[in-house]
Image (cartoon, coloured by chain):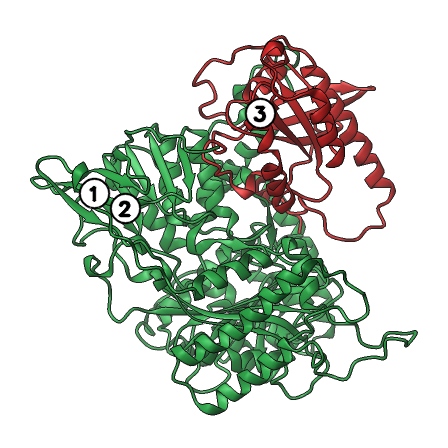
Chain colours: A red, B green
Amino acid sequence: MSMEDYDYLFKIVLIGNAGVGKTCLVRRFTQGLFPPGQGATIGVDFMIKTVEIKGEKVKLQIWDTAGQERFRSITQSYYRSANALILTYDITCEDSFRCLPEWLREIEQYANNQVVTILVGNKIDLAEKREVLRQRAEDFAEAQSMLYLETSAKESDNVEKLFLDLACELIREAKQNKLDNSDTAPMPGEGKTISYLSCCNVN
Amino acid sequence: MAAEDLPSEFDVIILGTGLCESVVAAACSRVGQRVLHLDRQSYYASNWASFTFNGLLTWIQEQQAESQPDEVQDWSGQVEEGEDLIYLSQSDSSSISNLQVFCYTSEEDEEDDTPNTTEEEKGGGASEATEAADSNKEDEEETEKQEAEEQVAQDEGAEPEADQPCPSADPNQSEPVKKKKISLAQLVKEGRRFNIDLVSKLMYSRGSLVDLLIKSNVSRYAEFKNVSRILTYRQGKVEQVPCSRADVFASRQLSVIEKRKLMRFLTSCVEETEDQQAYNGRPYLEFLSDQQLGENLQHFLLYSIAMATEDTPTEVGLASTRHFLRCLGRYGNTPFLFPVYGLGEIPQCFCRMCAVFGGIYCLRHSVRCLLVDKDTNRCKAVIDSRGQRISCNHFVVEEGYVDAERKQTATPTRCVSRAVLITDGSVLPSDSDQQVSMVTIPPVEAELPSVRMVELCSSTMTCMPGTYLVHLTCQSVGSAYEDLSPLVTRMFHTTESSDQEERPSVLWCLYFNMVDGSGLEVEGHDLPSNMYLCSGPDGALGHDHTIKQAELIFQKILPEEDFCPPAPNPEDIIYDGENGNGNSAEGEELKDDELKDDEEPKEQEEELTEQEKEIKEQEEEIKEQEEEKEEEQGLESEKGQGLETEE
């Protein structure tokens, strides 16, 4: 098989209430667009962007909820084999912040133990409508040992930083894991996609 | 998160998220239909679901709870002129029966002072067991003896003191002779590492489900593992069945002559011959025994490869043997794949596809009644559990939502007997402790059915490290306990088995019966003409019945449309300014793949020749050992026809 055109491939999954700007964050990062055209998400499973970090090519596969969060009906399989989760809320919407513990429960239930989680407060361009104080969110994130970042998909504030920080963290973890490879416990993602199984014909 | 209203108009409303409904949902949404997909449960996949250990305990409780009599609400206010009202059934317990739980391990960890954080769950587990015994007494007319036996099991499980049924090692001993049993508390604590399927099936690597997953690109949402071994249980012993060419040659159980006979037989049965046709209608067993294969091979071929019984007709036995052989070597050493995280992932993957194409999902939400046009007998709209009227052109529903009086079902209803065991070791330990095994077990006693066992290891992400998840399935003769517990007692160590240390111990197990969905037609019921029924899981090993049914329903709804055409690859449709090229690697991979399926390109042939070289070497080795050299040529000329093996 030919060498792939990247050094790392990570699956990043977005979650959070409907309307907090998840799709906007992805679109802003992958395409530089805001607002994303309505209906444009139909048929789009995930977005790809390859970034370069310290000379290494990192391919980010960014998955959106496909609207299943609207009625709290995200499939468990959505969380499987994610390397990182971006848990998003809207700083102008108290309710979206209050729902975070519920999302965390779902993460704990279905995502793998090693998943990197980052809490994102979006829509800081609407500072005058802020309902959730930065300190409160920082405290919450710290208590749950999550990273925290505030962004604006509209103004493109911190969006690039969000994904690049995540990529750095994921590379760091990947290298760490390689070091302490002594752990023989099976890891998620040990299975193979069908295409991989057939092309490599491995066991 | 709260009470957002659903849109009031859809093309297709689908109720239930089992495999059939989910495939229909994905197929309709994919070609542009507006789909609303609902399920009254809080989880996906209906009777196809998989649960964490704690989730399963909750499910058991729900099954045992008395179903609440439904408050009949009057929706006649919503009925417009010329419309009839059909109420749907609001409880779903009828498809599961004879549920029994046994715990054979200590409730708490002995040595560790486990903090009482899990107290609540433990209590739950224990009361579960008692409840199970109670309900059993109520539901079943059983012999006193059996009840007594069960009571013993209950007591063993329920009382912390009476834990270790076998003499255990002194905790202070420096070298642990026998590994410590995992306690119920630990199972609960590690509960999320389990994904326990209600249904136990495998995916034939050339079966209709795998074909559909590949064709539709839904395969990208899941990962799979090869089933690594085919085993059989014979004369009290578990043995590996050599089924691929590589296996046959590597096998230590078969004599050289047997190896040859087996290869020759497998090669010969790929093509249908007149000789075979002569046996049509007569048992496959008879055909096999006339091939002078010997008892060993006959057993393997009948039970493990054809997965037939003694009275299976020859043409059916041969057809399944051919299917088995066709599937062999596509992905691995056996014909089967298993999805990582369990089978319950598969319906969800189709739901994801539906959602990606705009389908709307709502769990914990049902349909109360249908509004039917009196003249056309078509369902015009439904009233959901919130009382909202939602119109639709087609209504697809899992049969469990429809009252029995309206369904035309084959009588008597057939059932599948199921057992789920958490054990502490493999039925056939090997160099690797991460094997996925399919085991075929002929009837262990007269009157009992033959049983299919799937043993899953922790790397399938369906059980915690140090344990195995064992699924038993058979067509019901009696209750699941009656059908399956004799086998459990023989093959495993429980409090009921005579003491045999080498066998794996059962830590916890669950028995239940589920209605076999294979006897239901999608149409022809006392229901509106644009309403289609999806059956629940059937008892077969593969998924053909369900996939065929889903395709049939789709064709009735949209006769002109393509069934699950490939979804575009995200890497092909995303334009990334900085990175225009080099992005399509994975896309090509998939396409190559499809080519491979259809056209069998050269690559594979080359691979085969390499394999052949290897095989030749192996054969030569064998030849050296051989005494009857005359037959060499015969073997040579046959190779490479029937079996494609990997490596």
The subunit carrying tag 3 is A
Of the residues shown, which amino acid type is indicated by label 1? Trp
Q: Residues at badges 2 and 1 in contact (C-beta under 8 Å)?
A: yes
Depth check: A150 or B602 in front? A150
Residue sitting nearer the eye, A107 or B450:
A107
Which x, y percent locates residue B463? 64, 58
Q: CA distance from mark 3 to mark 1?
A: 37 Å
Marks 3 and 1 share the same chain: no
Under circle 3, the secondary element is: helix
Q: Is residue B228 above or below residue B38?
A: below
Q: Secondary structure at mark 2?
A: strand
> Can residue A199 be seen in this snapshot?
no
**Residue B475 position by quadrant:** bottom left
Q: Which residue is mark 3?
A: A94
Q: Nearer the viewer, residue A93 or B542?
A: A93
| Gap in angstroms between the C-alphas marked 2 and 3 | 34 Å
Mark 2 vs mark 1: give the one in front.
1
Relative to B246, residue A12 above or below? above
Q: Chain of mark 2?
A: B
Q: Please report the residue visible at 62 percent of the width from the left and 37 percent of the height from the top.
A: A101
Name the residue at 39% across, 54% down. Answer: B544
Q: Residue furthest bottom?
A: B145
Q: Which residue is mark 1?
A: B75
Query: Can the viewer see residue A195?
Result: yes
| Residue marked by disc 2 | B368
Q: Secondary structure at mark 1?
A: loop
